[in-house]
Structures are given as C-alpha cells and as structure tokens.
Amino acid sequence: MPARPSAPAPSSASDSASDVVRWAAFSCALVPVVLLVYGTSFGGAAGTALGLAAVTTACRVLLRRSERVAEASGRRQNVPHRGGRHSRSGAGAHRGGRHGAGCAPGD
C-alpha cells in the first residue's frame, strides 16, 4: 500500500500576507507591460503603475497593522482574568437593558 502524502502545514497569517504583497508587486510590474503591448501610451502605463504601487503600499501597511493588532490581542488573551470583589461580571444596576414598567411612556 503506497504511503499517503502528508498535507502541507497550515501557513500563518504573516506568510499569507507576504504572499499577497508579492503577488501585488508582481502585478505592479506586469500590468503596465501588458498595457504597453496592447497600445496604451507610456504615460498611461506609468500612471497605472504608480496607482497600483500606491494601492499595494497602502494594503501592505494595513496588513502589517492588522498582524500587530492580532498579535497583541493574542498576548492579552493569555493574561489570567482578575476576578474577585471588584470584577465587572454579572448583572448589576449599571448594565443597561430594559427598565421596569414605571418608565413606560404615558405613565
């Protein structure tokens, strides 16, 4: 019986973000070349390249920021909860929600 190939290990979010940025950079180079081949002016192709580069840079910044936020929230989840007398759990007078019948309009 032949051995089954093992499934690839799941990649982290950082790896997938890097892949997205690599593909976007590739597109920033490829799209203007294709536009030039199909007869677009050099200025139009250059403008398209600059626009794609700007969008790619903005997306890269947002991806890195979201990775940092996710990493920070992961670290916060590992901190044990402080419980005790002054904890903010449970229903209390300051929890909002519906009030008694005395607050109905027309009373």
Image: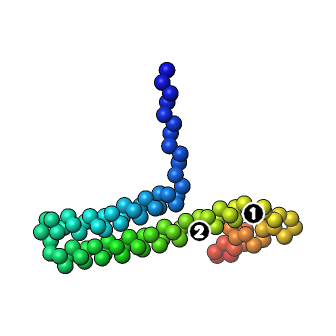
Front residue of this view, candidates 15 and 88: 15
Kindly state the secondary structure of the residue where label 2 is placed. helix
Kindly state the secondary structure of the residue where label 1 is placed. loop
In the image, is residue 21 above or below residue 45?
Answer: above
Looking at the image, residue 94 sits to the left or right of residue 32; the answer is right
Front residue of this view, candidates 106 and 68: 68
Q: Which label number is shown at residue 88?
A: none
Residue 70, image x, y percentages: 59, 64
Q: Give the residue displayed 15% in from the left and 65% down from the top.
A: 37
Please give the residue where the numbered disc 2 appears in the rendered image: 69
Residue situated furthest left in the rendering:
39
Residue type at mark 2 is Val
Residue type at mark 1 is Val
Q: Quadrant of residue 39?
A: bottom left
Q: Give the residue displayed 48% in from the left and 34% down from the top.
A: 5
- Ranked by sequence position, the earlier of labels 2 and 1 is 2
Tag count: 2
Residue 106, image x, y percentages: 64, 76
Residue situated furthest top in the rendering:
1
Circle 2 residues within 10 Å: few <14, some 14–19, many ≥20: few
